[in-house]
Amino acid sequence: MKTYQVDENGFYGEFGGAYVPEILHRCVEVLQKTYLEVIESESFKAEYYQLLRDYVGRPSPLYYAKRLSEKYGCKMYLKREDLNHTGAHKINNTIGQILLARRMGKTRIIAETGAGQHGVATATVCALMNMDCIVYMGKTDVERQQVNVQKMKMLGATVVPVTSGNMTLKDATNEAIRDWCCHPADTFYIIGSTVGPHPYPDMVARLQSVISEEIREQLMEKEGRDYPDTLIACVGGGSNAAGTIYHYIDDERVRLILAEAGGKGVDSGESAATIQLGRKGIIHGARTLVMQSEDGQIEEPYSISAGLDYPGIGPVHANLAVKKRAAILAVDDDEALEAAFELTRLEGIIPALESAHALGTLPKIQFRPDEVVVLTVSGRGDKDIETYIAYFNTKNK
Ligand SMILES: *Cc1c(COP(=O)(O)O)cnc(C)c1O
């Protein structure tokens, strides 16, 4: 059967795989051989689902957005990942990975972070499980994301500022990989999205697939059928999108729409539209689409949203895009800001800037009046309030 899920070698079509330094080879191989058996075991599932329920607050609601539906002429449901503990979907993944790390006998957790959201989600579960936590973060990001840095420290994590390269996410990731190479025996690397060498993209997608599992049940209850006509999500590395589409990826009745960050415009030179601008290459251990110069140097992406400016993209999404299974729409900074204000005014929900990119696709899509649409609100907007206020003030001058 044709499938868009990972194959037995860790590939999605021509994307994915595990291109890691020699020293990590064994470590990655052990993870490849272990992860499925562990995360599909009854004891893992029992602990994972109990924490998702009592600690994260799942299931997250599937909310029928009446006024948004009227505006866009369809039946619009919002999957409310913004209501999770720590304010986004990232915690679904970090809980799963730390439970796996413990079962593999690891004692030390490392992570990379850009804006600090994944760092906070990792530091949170390390506090919960009483494990050592080291978070690598570009020095530039440390300076502009002070609140998240303070949160991580309060949670007991060590934040290491990285001073190589542009001192942002890509450099933090390189440093985390370097640490992992030095401590392969006792260290578990918790990656924050559907990126990195196999099995990470598949593992993170599975841990986030609780989103589509819940959508199935919730739609059955509300619509009398367990699938939507259309799914919409934003993509940075691709984890909330992967979780949203997981159980529907091979169900061609369901239209998939992914929003990437257009920044100041796809052709402006300041963009994070990796799928449209990227070329095939290898980044952080996976073959995928990468924003790179003519001679293969990774280019620094730009987006107003810190969670979307990764120069690569999950291999699952690269494959969905080149096979045309998913439609990829770029949403610019201004379109995302407008969409954030629209959701706030129509539904009383202030979304994260990343999620606002998913909402920013709505004016670009044709809907049928009876079309059932599920859009994932990946996180809440508290962290973006300064950006929203600045935009509001310039508009109302
Ligand atoms: C990190 C983040 C994203 C982007 O990450 P994905 O792995 O693409 O989901 C999107 N939304 C929010 C709220 C985030 O914090």
Image (spheres, rainbow, N blue to C red):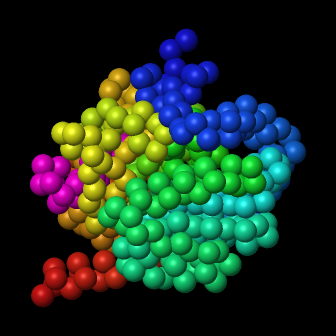
- Magenta stretch holds residue 338: no
Query: Percent from the top left, x then y, of residue 393?
Result: 21, 85
The quarter holding residue 89 reads bottom right
Instruction: Name the one closer to the observer, 306 or 198.
Output: 198
Q: Quadrant of the N terminus?
A: top right
Nearest the viewer among 177 and 357 is 177
Residue 269 forms part of the magenta stretch: yes
Compared to residue 154, the image places residue 234 above or below, namely above
| Left or right of residue 363, residue 234 in this image | right
Magenta-highlighted residues: 257-274
Residue at 54%, 54% (x, y): give it. Answer: 178
Front residue (pair 329, 171): 171
Q: Is residue 188 above or below residue 346?
A: above
Residue at the image position 58 percent from the left and 36 percent from the top? 22
- List x then y, in percent, for residue 287: 42, 33
- For the point 16% across and 80% down, the residue is 395
Tell me where residue 125 sits by quadrant.
Answer: bottom right
Residue 326 percent location from the top left of the image: 36, 33
Q: Is residue 351 visible?
A: no
Most extreme residue toward the right, as rendered? Answer: 43
12 is higher (above) or lower (below) than 211: above
* Residue 345: x %, y % from top left: 33, 73
Quarter of the C terminus within the rendering: bottom left
- Would residue 325 appear left or right of 379 to someone viewing this image? left
Q: Residue at x 87, y 45 (%)?
A: 43
